[in-house]
Each structure stands twice: as C-alpha cells, then as structure tokens.
C-alpha cells in the first residue's frame, strides 16, 4: 500500500537507517527517503530528534519516532498486515531483544575497535575480540533459528534486521584489513545466513555495495583517527 505520510530521515551508509528501511520493505510500506548530511544536519532532523540529533528518524503522520530498534518495533505494530517482524511467542521475543541489545552493545563497538586500532598488535587484539563476539552470535543463531534459515525462522525478523544491518560494514572491515570475520570454521551458520540475508528481496536493494562503502569508510576512519585519508 502506498503511504504518502511516511518519511525516513537517513543516510545511505548508516547501518541503523538500514534497519528501518528493511522493516519498511518487509511490510511493503512505501516511504519518502530524505538523505541527511550529518555534517550539516537539517532543521527537520534537529526538530524531530532533539535529544540525540541522530538518524534514523521515521516520521509517520507528522510524528517522529527515533532509535532504530524502536522504529522497527513501531513499524511492526502499525503495519500489521505484512509479515510479523517480532516473534509472537513472548519468550522468543525477549530472546530476540536480548541479542539485539548484545549486537548494539558488543558487536557494533567491536567493529569500531578494529577500525580505530593503531598498529598490528592492537589490530590483532581487536580482531580476536570481535571474533569472540561473533562466535557468541553464531551460538545464538543456532538456538534462535532452530535449524531454519534465519534467526527468526523461515523469514527475516527482528534479530536478522538488528544484526544484518551491520553486514555491509563487516564486509568493509574484512576488505580493508585483509581479514576474515565470518568464516566456515568458527561461524559456519552465520556464513550461510549472511548469503541468504543479502539476497532477500527486502534487503537486496538497500544493502550498500561494499566497494562504495569502503571509499566512504576510508574518509570516515581517517577522521576518527585524526589522520588525513589516502
Ligand atoms: N542508537 C541509535 C544510533 C544511531 C546513530 O548512531 N546514527 C548515526 C549515523 S549511523 C548518527 O546519526 N550520527 C550523527 C551524530 O552522532 O551526530 C539507533 O539505533 O538509532
């Protein structure tokens, strides 16, 4: 159904914005995407998210909803005719929320740790630490998916979105550092899951291309380290 009253404030490289986009795609909600320049935030963004001033912000019927996982839950509750994003069972729902919080608290900082690590030794320590986190997520995948293709079962759901939005950045990290984060030996379930996730129709058109993201990342990481980019 076409929705003229749905706007998303975002930016193409943002993994958090991707969560909202995938959720809207899963529910077949059309929306207006407003690309933000984070170096010069729009009045609309500052007015819509005055607390954090961050993207994504979903604006539905002129009302702003902030924080990517809150947005995903909102989309699930408002557009009930599409497939459910959160599990229907309360225990499964609690488990999915637990692991989504783990992704934000552990996996996102791990990737950032690799990006800003200075020197070979620090980089190796950051990569080892990131792999430990991935091994935990691999175990969660086994428990949550119960042998099905996605964390949520037969189709993409809450935890797939929460973790999958960082997949393009994971590939960037692998490419820029010449490392393997997802591999057949330690995370075989996630290797297969990542292929399926990237190919899903709700994801395919919105997951940023690795090479384009690498170019963006070079500039971003140089800024984070305070050094000029090559
Ligand atoms: N916890 C937030 C994180 C959002 C976030 O960090 N967004 C970044 C872009 S990826 C942002 O808006 N940064 C701008 C800033 O920090 O000023 C969420 O899940 O929505």
Image (tube, helix red, strand yellow):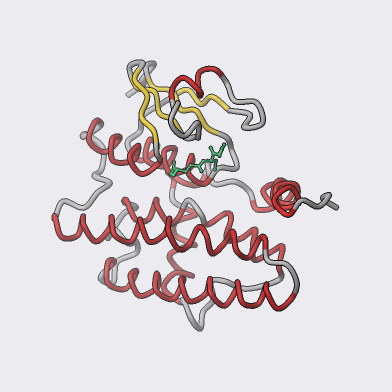
Task: Decide which of 68, 121 is in the foreground and name it.
Answer: 121
Number of callouts in the render? 0
Give the quarter of the figure containing the N terminus. Answer: top left
The residue located at (54%, 46%) in the rendering is 207
Horizontal arrangement in the rendering, residue 66 relative to residue 54 (left or right): left
The location of residue 194, given as percent across then percent down, is: 48, 62
The location of residue 92, given as percent across then percent down, is: 19, 60
The residue located at (47%, 22%) in the rendering is 32
Q: Is residue 175 above or below residue 15?
A: below
The location of residue 219, given as percent across then percent down, is: 75, 47
The location of residue 72, given as percent across then percent down, is: 34, 40
Q: Quadrant of residue 62?
A: top left
The residue located at (65%, 53%) in the rendering is 210
Horizontal arrangement in the rendering, residue 67 relative to residue 174 (left or right): left
Task: Decide which of 63, 24 is in the foreground and name it.
Answer: 63
Q: Is residue 33 above or below residue 91?
A: above
Q: Is residue 10 above or below residue 107?
A: above
């Amino acid at each position: 159904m076409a929705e003229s009253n749905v706007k998303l404030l975002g930016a193409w490289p943002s993994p958090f914005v991707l969560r909202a986009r995938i959720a809207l795609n899963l529910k077949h909600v059309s929306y207006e995407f407003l690309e933000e320049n984070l170096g010069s935030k729009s009045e609309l963004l500052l007015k819509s998210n005055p607390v954090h001033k961050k993207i994504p912000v979903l604006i539905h019927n002129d009302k702003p909803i902030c924080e990517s996982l809150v947005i995903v839950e909102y989309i699930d509750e408002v557009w009930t005719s599409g497939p459910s994003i959160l599990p229907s069972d309360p225990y499964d729902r609690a488990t999915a929320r637990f692991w989504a919080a783990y992704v934000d608290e552990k996996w996102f900082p791990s990737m950032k740790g690799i990006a800003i690590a200075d020197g070979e030794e620090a980089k190796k320590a950051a990569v080892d630490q990131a792999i430990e986190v991935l091994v935990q997520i691999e175990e969660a995948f086994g428990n949550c998916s119960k042998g099905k293709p996605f964390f949520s079962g037969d189709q993409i759901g809450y935890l797939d979105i929460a973790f999958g939005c960082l997949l393009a950045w994971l590939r960037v990290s692998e490419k820029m550092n010449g490392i393997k984060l997802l591999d057949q030996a330690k995370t075989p379930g996630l290797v297969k899951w990542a292929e399926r996730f990237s190919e899903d129709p709700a994801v395919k058109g919105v997951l940023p291309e690795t090479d384009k993201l690498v170019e963006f990342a070079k500039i971003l990481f140089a800024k984070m380290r305070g050094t000029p980019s090559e």
